[in-house]
Image: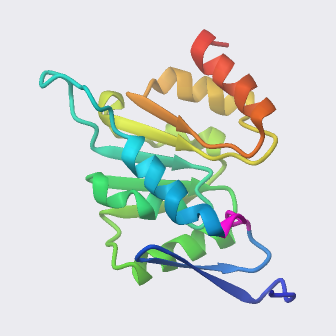
Amino acid sequence: CITDNNGTSTEYIDDFVFTNTAGAFFQNNNSILPRFTQYIRDHILPRNSSPEDPQIKYLIDAYSGSGLFTITLSSLFTTSTGIDISGPSITSAKENAKMNNLSSSQCSFIAADAPKLFESVTYPKDETVVVIDPPRKGCDESFLTQLLKFGPKRVVYVSCNLHTQARDVGVLVRGM
């Protein structure tokens, strides 16, 4: 238990280590994180893609925090990019990538508001998967509009709020 908001917590998930400023967000159900991240790892790529389909090579982790999915999934992709609005979280994410021996070409992070993410994306949409792990309020309309316009090959939506997830998935399925 860390009571100093400027203190540092450390989490171990399988072979990965994460440090975070105590006042920053990190998945708080740490007892499930190894199984949870393994589940995402096992299901993030399509199982039955045809040989003619472009292979998914790129990961965008929107709302990345200190890099949980960007880092734990990085071995599956040519390049993984995490984005978060919190500068301190991105600082932790970059430190976590270094601690886990990931180069900046393999795993990078951007401090920016998620709704502005797609302004700088250069990945081909048919070779990209986007992981969304937003706060309880879910995704805002600007982000969803950009995500729909970008049209990645695959989207994985992780949520702690079933209601906002259902709302956002409805928008992704039916459009704005």
Residue at x 21%, y 29% (from the top left corner): 54
| Residue 28 location (% of width, % of height) | 72, 66
Magenta span of residues? 25-30
Number of numbered labels in the structure image:
0
**Residue 111 showing in the rendered view:** yes
Q: Is residue 72 left or right of residue 145?
A: left
* Rendering colour mode: rainbow
Q: Is residue 66 left or right of residue 170?
A: left
Q: Quadrant of residue 146?
A: top right
Q: Is residue 157 left or right of residue 37?
A: right
Query: Measured along the vertical axis of the image, is residue 116 above or below residue 52?
Result: below
Q: Quadrant of the C terminus?
A: top right
Query: Measured along the vertical axis of the image, is residue 163 above or below residue 38?
Result: above
Q: Nearer the viewer, residue 136 or 144?
A: 136
Q: Nearer the viewer, residue 32 or 65?
A: 32
56 inside magenta stretch: no
Q: Is residue 16 left or right of residue 174?
A: left
> Going by the picture, which residue comes out furthest to the left?
51
Q: Quadrant of residue 6?
A: bottom right
Q: Quadrant of residue 38?
A: bottom left
Q: Quadrant of the N terminus?
A: bottom right
Residue at x 38%, y 47% (from the top left corner): 42
**Residue 69 showing in the rendered view:** no
Query: Measured along the vertical axis of the image, is residue 10 above or below residue 97?
Result: below
Residue at x 29%, y 34% (from the top left corner): 127
| Residue 150 location (% of width, % of height) | 47, 26
| Residue 20 location (% of width, % of height) | 65, 78
Predominant secondary structure, magenta span: loop
| Residue 13 location (% of width, % of height) | 50, 72
> Going by the picture, which residue comes out furthest to the top?
174
